[in-house]
Image (cartoon, rainbow, N blue to C red):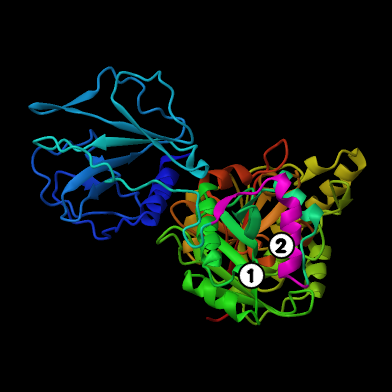
Amino acid sequence: MKEATARIKINVLLEATGWRFFRDATGPANIRLDPSVTIKPADLEGLGENFEKPANRFVDFLLLDEKGFPLLVLEAKATDKNPLVGKKTGVRKTGVRSIPISYINFSDSQPTSTRPAAKCQHVRLGSRIAPYQRRFARLSLYPPCPLRPNALRVMIEPRNPHGGGMLRKAVLDDVDALVSLENHCFVSDRLARRNFRYMLTRANASVLVDVDGGRMRAYVLLLYSNACSMARLYSIAVDPGFSGQGLGSALIEAAEREALEHDCVSMRLEIRKDNAASLALFARHGYRQFTEVLRYYEDQMDALRFEKHLVPQSRPELRKVPFYRQTLDFTCGPSSLMMAMKTLDPALELSRKLELRIWREATTVFMTSGHGGCGPYGLALSAWRRGFELEIHVNDDGVFLGDSVRSAEKKEVMRLVQEDFLDELAGLPIPVEHGALDVGDLQAKFDAGGMLLVLISSYAIYRERFPHWVVVTGFDERFIYIHDPLVQYEKGEALADSLHMPVPRRLFQRMVRYGKAGQKAVLVLRRRACVGN
């Protein structure tokens, strides 16, 4: 757990318990709010000279009472950092006075009796926030102001405030009740018993249930990506006998909190086009439609795709890149290239015929144990033939993707194919740059109008080691956004899971290499200027 993530979760806790945030930071010069905090409470006037200022002159959160009187400073800490370590005394020097410091550790059980000498307070919270440890530094007011018993309203009861039931995570013993509720709520596209067992035991997923008096009234199922900070609300169901009691809203709110616990910044879902009640419900919760999929459901009904950004102001301006799903295991390169070319040339028609034609032009012939994939040189030639300027950036002169095969004969074929590509490139104005591009270099080329095709190792996403091409759609301070042409429907994925996937910058830097040699490849595409212009 990183401090930035802890701050996001503190935001959610405070909002959920009724705290109002001031969004315009205008305070005295001697105390500032940490600029990385997403929501900035900022009515800082009237603190006086006795306000205890952290060493770095920043605070994460300042809590004020109804009259603007300061109550607490809230400091987020990473999970692996104990704020009590190294504290030899329970006081801190603040000019002419020594002020007591209180530490509150959020936990799921009562604290043990062995604690450092510093004065501690403990708050019992629900299990979903148990892993997070945070420090609370008392304000040094003169005279000292005692902490009100309910000043920090962060007690989150697991009880559902909308209907009296208990919201909790599902366990294997709930499978029978989940199947019964599923069959009661849906007439098609039902999840089977094995689906629920898989979600509870093996999937990267969360299942939350609402239970009242031993009866399951509702559930919600979330799926997470291994490599990006995005959650998918896969299924939500409320027993019709309990409709109108706010259970749907309670589940959505609980699902959003759970997604934040998994470090997700956005949530996506599909809704039947004829489901007016669900469309209205999610619209009230701030979800917006971003695409439509024809004949998505088993009965051929269309689906509307929605998204909500769970962290305020987290959505960057992303490039509108048309999506094309690869139709074969080995055509990620052509599919990514097609998306990039379509962005630069909207008149280009995307089709499976074009996908296969580009693969034939660019294939390495062999790769892993199946058909050959595509390396940077063949893809570059395909793009050039279709009117695009480009740069090739590689860090290795060796046979590209050669680590994917063991046979010496196959390696030799791949070498000859690459040699032929390079001979053709030598007669064209296509620069081949040797050296790796870091994230800053990639963003600079993207901001200059280039479309980026990047070769990654798929292990971070799919837990399988194969080379994979993706296309970049945007950047912000924390994430690089990509379209991934691979959609694994058989594993419960949907098209929405592959659109604008937010990959943390640090993880992306580790992903952009393949094989034992750590081969890297990036293609930068631009629309070729017409002759005479």
Position in image of residue 493 (x %, y %): 71, 60
**For the point 55% across and 75% down, which residue is it?**
289
Left/right of residue 99 with respect to residue 477 in the rendered view: left
Q: Is residue 250 visible?
A: yes
Query: Compared with residue 425, is residue 288 higher up or lower down, i.e. above or below?
Result: below
Q: Is residue 359 magenta?
A: no
x, y percentage for residue 309?
48, 62
Which residue is under mark 1? Answer: 241
Residue in the image at 53% along x and 68% along y: 245
Residue neighbourhood size for the residue with mark 2, other residues' Cα within 10 Å, grouped as few (<14), some (14–19), many (≥20): many
Of helix, strand and loop, which one carries label 1? helix
Residue at the image point whose x is 61% and y is 66% from the top: 269
Point out residue 132 in the picture as x, y percentages from the top left corner: 45, 38
What stretch of residues is rendered in magenta? 165-187
> Looking at this rendering, what residue extends furthest in the front direction?
213
Secondary structure beneath label 2: helix
